[in-house]
Image: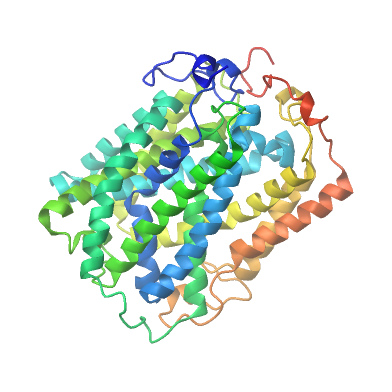
Amino acid sequence: MTNATLASPVKATSIEPGGIEAIPADRRHGSPKQLFATWSAPNLEFATIFVGMIAVAFFGLGFWQAMAALVLGNALGAASQGILSTWGPREGLAQLVLSRTAFGKRGNILPAAINTIMAGLGWFTVNSVSGALALTALTGMPAWLSLLVVVVAEVAVAFVGHDLVQLFERYASVVLGVIFVVATIVIFLNANVSAPVKGGGFTWAGFTLTAAAAFGYAAGWNPYAADYSRYLPKSASSKAIAWSAGLGNFISCTVLMAAGAAAATITFDGANPTSTFTHSLGPVLGGFALAAIAIGAVAANALNVYSGAMSFLAAGVRIPFALRRAIVALAFGIIGFVLALAAVLNGQLSLTYENFLLVIAYWIAPWLGIVLVDRFLRRGTEIASLVPDAAKYRNPSGIIALVVGGAVSIILFSNQVFFHGLFVAPSLTKTDFNGIGDYTPLVGFLLAGILYYALFTAFKPKLGGPLSATPDVVIGVDAADEVA
């Protein structure tokens, strides 16, 4: 039976019903290669460019030093994105629903809630602000009106749902890819990539801060990964899924971060960083770049709002409406608009974004260590009997490992303006970048993963039956599922 015969004929503009229930076989469609566009288009935006800028302008690295750190962080985040994406087709479940095996239904409320805030509100605010500033620079509209236009477009795509999101990302990846590749070439023709390192020389603190920020950005998509592969047929190639998702993430992040780092060697305006990027592009290409930044914000936030709604429902929130996911997405858009408007009026985007990238990595790294170890320990077993609401499955190992691993890594190694770990010099506020920088994500990942392995062995949480016992459709996952 072909993929085409499995799929129900649903228009991309039809509102996706339901919430986080498993996707049955007759609704499965698509191919792994679509994930390349899914995970490249949302990175073709100014937030990606800005990571490269801060590596040079804030963290004091030369271009090639910055690129080494950026490539390292992107590679780690993209590799995990590829691995997690392969988990979607087997059960047809969203990423934060799959997370229930490591945390239990109640324990999973914490990571689901964190991702709801980070995705539906945090990332939404950051990207909406950068898109609005670009649209204002392009059109001369008031910032609040530009923000409204951008937010309406973002929420509209997410409100309709999965198929429209995938379609939008597919076309956006082509349009944005062409514009940003041309812009990147022009920037490199004007950049001085061999310029002396800011502050006089390489610093390990600057390197680790840059790598952590890049990882925070690339891995920021990790808690969404299976959300966009769960519609693929069960027979879809895991290898093709991993490579498509991972490369889409890695290539787009690396190219645009390189453009940002190169642009920062030309000039840097902390008050209006978009002008740094467009400085050497000229009026015509600069105009296209500003338009691309605004469209890129929509491409990124369509995913943030959609997956934020999925995480909200994965926490077990009961909304007994057929369009519960769409309703939650709309609510996030309204709240996000208010937060983004406050950020626009505040005008402190640079420092806020720098801190936000590191905080993202602080929670994702330990969560990632836990879910990867959990999947390894459950190899060869089914999880369909564990994730439904009625299963009342508990696993204290995950929540303990997440809280302890996250807290210890932050207390010892955090490098934020508002808090410095016990082993860290305050590098973010110094131009000489003394100290070790930021090891929080690395320590959090390793500590949480190791601790989870030990606790799993001690608590011996329930395992499912053999993998061959997995049902065709997992029933009762959604809190509002009538058949649960």
Q: In the displayed structure, would residue 278 be above or below residue 304?
A: below
Q: In this view, does 395 lie above or below 272?
A: above
Q: Which residue is drawn at 61% across and 55% down?
A: 365
297 lies left or right of 368: left
Residue 8 % position (x, y): 49, 14
**Which image quadrant: the N terminus?**
top right
Q: Which of 77 and 347 is in front in this view?
A: 77
Find the residue positioned furthest to the front: 1
Residue at the far bottom: name it. Answer: 200
Q: Is residue 406 above or below residue 460?
A: below
- Asked whether the viewer can see residue 12, the reply is yes
Q: Residue at x 59, y 68 (%)?
A: 439
From the viewer's perspective, is 236 left or right of 283? right
- The reply to whether residue 161 is in sight is no
* 346 up-or-down from 156: above or below: below
Q: Quarter of the image holding residue 472?
A: top right
Residue 173 falls in image quadrant? top left
**Residue reaching furthest to the left:** 283
Picture coordinates of residue 260, whole percent (x, y): 32, 62
Q: Position of residue 302 (x, y in %)?
A: 40, 36
Compared across the picture, whether 37 is left or right of 472 comes to left
What scheme was used to colour the molecule?
A: rainbow
- Residue 381: % across, % down: 79, 34
Residue 222 in the figure: left or right of residue 52? right
